[in-house]
Image: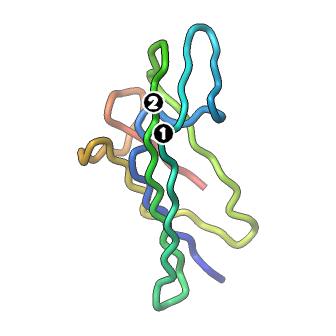
């Protein structure tokens, strides 16, 4: 069974569906890259780089979800913005939470 390792980079205000506009808010992706590295033990390491462009409004939080299928586990999540790492937590600027 493969265990998925996810390194999430630049999940700043995070993710609304592509180019969604609601209540005076609009955001789109200037960049969305995913690199998958297969580790020697068969694990997969994902590095996701995103550049979000705020077109209008203020964003205080966002979400990112994905389906890992029946075999996937997500571990060792890291989030950073502009090279500054976020810390685990919620409801505070500079924090993130992750779960399976």
Residue drawn at (52%, 38%), measured in percent from left and top?
Answer: 29
Q: Earlier in the sequence, mark 1 or mark 2?
A: 1
Q: Residue furthest front?
A: 30
Question: Relative to residue 37, is residue 9 drawn left or right?
Answer: left
- State the quadrant of the C terminus: bottom right
Number of residues whose C-alpha sits closer than 10 Å to that of mark 2, classed few (under 14), some (14–19) or many (20 or more): some
- Say which of 58 and 96 sits in front: 58
Say the numbered circle drawn on residue 53.
2
Q: Residue furthest right?
A: 70
SS at mark 1? strand
The answer for how far apart the CA atoms under marks 1 and 2 are is: 6 Å
Number of residues whose C-alpha sits closer than 10 Å to that of mark 1, classed few (under 14), some (14–19) or many (20 or more): few
Residue 2, position as x, y percentages in the image:
62, 80
- Say which of 46 and 18 sits in front: 18
- State the quadrant of the N terminus: bottom right
Residue 87, position as x, y percentages in the image:
31, 44
Residue 76 quadrant: bottom left
Residue drawn at (36%, 37%), measured in percent from left and top?
Answer: 95
Residue tagged 1: 30
Residue drawn at (57%, 8%), measured in percent from left and top?
Answer: 24
Residue 35, position as x, y percentages in the image:
49, 67
Q: Looking at the image, do the residues carrying marks 1 and 2 touch, with CB atoms under 8 Å apart?
A: yes
Q: Residue furthest left?
A: 84
Say the numbered circle drawn on residue 82.
none
SS at mark 2? strand
Vertical side of 64 occupied by 54: above or below: above
Residue 53 quadrant: top left
Vertical side of 40 occupied by 62: above or below: above
Q: So how many labels did they put on this image?
A: 2
Vertical side of 40 occupied by 70: above or below: above
């Amino acid at each position: 069974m493969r265990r998925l390792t996810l390194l999430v980079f630049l999940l700043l205000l995070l993710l609304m569906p592509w180019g969604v506009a609601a209540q005076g808010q609009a955001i789109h992706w200037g960049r969305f890259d995913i690199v998958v590295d297969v580790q020697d033990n068969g694990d997969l390491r994902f590095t996701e780089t995103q550049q979000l462009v705020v077109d209008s409004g203020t964003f205080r939080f966002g979400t990112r979800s994905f389906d890992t299928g029946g075999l996937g586990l997500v571990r060792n999540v890291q989030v950073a913005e502009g090279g500054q790492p976020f810390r685990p937590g919620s409801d505070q600027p500079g924090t993130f939470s992750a779960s399976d």
